[in-house]
Image: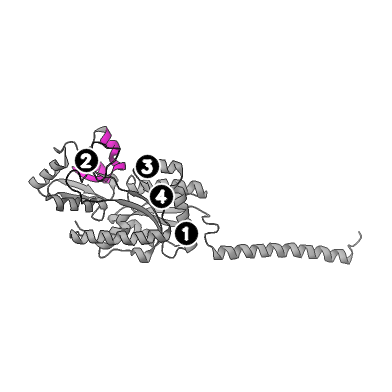
Amino acid sequence: MNAMPTEEVATERGAIMSRFGFAFVLALSAAAVSAQDPSHGWPARAVRIIVPSSPGGATDRYARLLAQGLSENLKHQFIVDNRPGASGNIGAVAAARAVPDGYTILVASNQALAISPSLERNLPYNVERDFAPVARGVMIRVFVFVVHPSLQAKTLADLVAIGKREPGKLPYGSAGAASPAYLCVRMFEEASGARFLHVPFKGLGQGMQSLMSGDIKFTLADIGAVLPHIRSGRLLALAVTERTASLPGTPTLAEAGYPNLEVFASFSVVAPSGTPRAIVQRLGAEVVKAMKSPPILEKLEAQAMIPVFDTPDVFAASLKKESEMWARVIRRNAITADQ
């Protein structure tokens, strides 16, 4: 067999080395891009969404809609991990201690992020220190006072009369002293002069079971959680916080004589502090994208949830402002965590 001429061998070797060098440069470039932008290639596996409440509540309902949208858009599973208890503290601590790599995020209500910091002196996490704000996803502004039909109360005035006649005896439920619903009931007590017996639950799901069985007699809940039970006659609506087409005949709190009572819930996404800024920004954009999807928007509307399209920086500023507002409410009404 004839040997390849020296010049041809050199040319072939040069071509091989050229191809190898080009591939090497491409690999280095990809590595450099990945190093400069950690969101490149994220996510490469499933992402865990910690929810610090029980299944069935508003936080859980929002988290599952968000998980659906993110999973479809990013082609990797976003898995909801419910961690209820201690007014959201258990789940929040689990998220704060997670590895800040973009594969664990927290979906929490303003109870955990904006109220508890002013209510609990020994809170086991610090919102500003332990979390990176990603996005405020949705808000709920329509809440409704609902009672068990066995209670002889057809109007809010009837409920007040019972609370004055037997102060501190009529049991009602909430998701804990840090929940917006509880704060509103406390303000309602202050404004009306009535007093009721607070029964805290780990989440709305447990509270609704107790209300449906008649163990507690009333609660203040977001309309999306109780509307089917109102329509079926298993619960009676006394008043709503804002006018809604879903319950056109139900008076607002203002119409019932309490114009200064305000309550709203917000549900937001945060990541463990130290999560790369590029991933936080990418995740924030993906949350907005998921919330703008027509199928998700339709489901949000059905649950009286209002989407909010904040950037991480705007969300951080609004969270600070809301925290200050709830702090004033807590101080003004002398509310403590053990109530």
The prevailing secondary structure element of the residues shown in magenta is helix
333 with respect to 272 (left or right): left
Q: Where is residue 271 in the image (x, y as percent from the top left)?
A: 41, 59
**Which residue carries the number 3 mark?**
301
Q: Which amino acid does label 4 sit on?
A: Val
Q: Can residue 19 be seen in this view?
A: yes
* Spatial separation of the CA atoms under disc 3 and disc 2: 21 Å
Determine whether label 4 and label 3 are within 8 Å by CB: no
Q: Where is residue 167 in the image (x, y as percent from the top left)?
A: 10, 49
Q: What residue type is labelled 1?
A: Gln
State the residue in front, 59 or 308: 308
Q: Earlier in the sequence, mark 4 or mark 3?
A: 4
Q: Earlier in the sequence, mark 4 or mark 1?
A: 4
The stretch of residues the image draws in magenta is: 206-231
Which label is found at residue 80? 4
Q: What residue type is labelled 2?
A: Pro
> Secondary structure beneath disc 1?
helix
Q: Which of marks 1 and 2 is nearer the N terminus?
A: 2
* Spatial separation of the CA atoms under disc 1 and disc 2: 42 Å
170 with respect to 6 (left or right): left
Q: Looking at this view, name the residue that lies furthest to the left.
A: 165
